[in-house]
Amino acid sequence: MPKPPTADEFAAAARLREALRAFQRHSDDASGAAGLTTRTYQLLLMVKTARAGNGHASLRELEERLQLGKSTVTELVLRTERRGLVQRKLDRARPGAIAIRLTPAGERRLAQVVAELGDERRRLADALSKLR
C-alpha cells in the first residue's frame, strides 16, 4: 500500500488541477467564440500537427492523440467535414487508408483559437514548471 500523501503533495495536486481546469475553461471559451466545440478544436489541432509533419493525419493517429474510440473519431471527422473544416482523402502511402487534412476554413478557425489561447498556454506552462 502506498504511503499517504503529505500536505504539500495535496497542495501540489490541487494547484495542478486548478491550472488545468482554468486552461480548459479558457479553451472552451475560445473554441466557442470561433464557432467550434472543444473536441472540434482539438481535432483540428491534431490534424494540423500530424506526426508525419505533413498536415495529414490518419484516423488511427487521431484516435491515439485524442484518446477517443474509432467510432467517436469517425463521427467527429464526418461532422467536421460537413462543416467544411476538414477534408478526407485516400492516403497514397497506405492503400485503403484515409488521410484527414484541414481546409482553409479549418485553418482560419484553428489559428483564431490558438492565437486566443497564447497567454493561457504560457500561464499553464508556468504553473506546471512550479510544480516540480
Image (cartoon, rainbow, N blue to C red):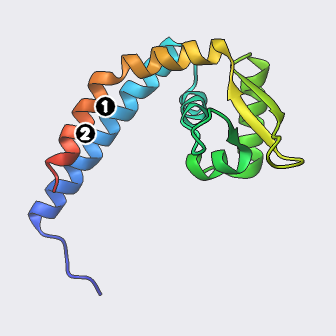
| Residue position marked by numbered label 1 in the rendering | 121
Q: Quadrant of residue 116?
A: top left
SS category of the residue bearing label 2: helix
- Number of the label disc, if any, that sits on residue 110: none
SS category of the residue bearing label 1: helix
Q: Position of residue 7 (x, y in %)?
A: 10, 63
Q: Nearer the viewer, residue 51 or 60?
A: 51
At horizontal 89% and vertical 47% (from top left) the residue drawn is 96
Outermost residue toward the front in this view: 93
| Residue position marked by numbered label 2 in the rendering | 125
Q: Position of residue 46 (x, y in %)?
A: 56, 37
Q: Quadrant of residue 115?
A: top left
What is the quadrant of the C terminus in the image?
Answer: bottom left
Q: Is the Cβ of the residue at disc 1 closer than 8 Å to that at disc 2?
A: yes
Q: Is residue 128 above or below residue 81?
A: below
How far separated are the C-alphas under marks 1 and 2?
6 Å
Mark 1 crowdedness (10 Å alpha carbons): few <14, some 14-19, many ≥20: some
Indicate left or right for 128 with 23 as reference.
left
Q: Position of residue 87 (x, y in %)?
A: 76, 25
At horizontal 38% and vertical 29% (from top left) the residue drawn is 25
Q: Which amino acid is tagged 1?
A: Arg
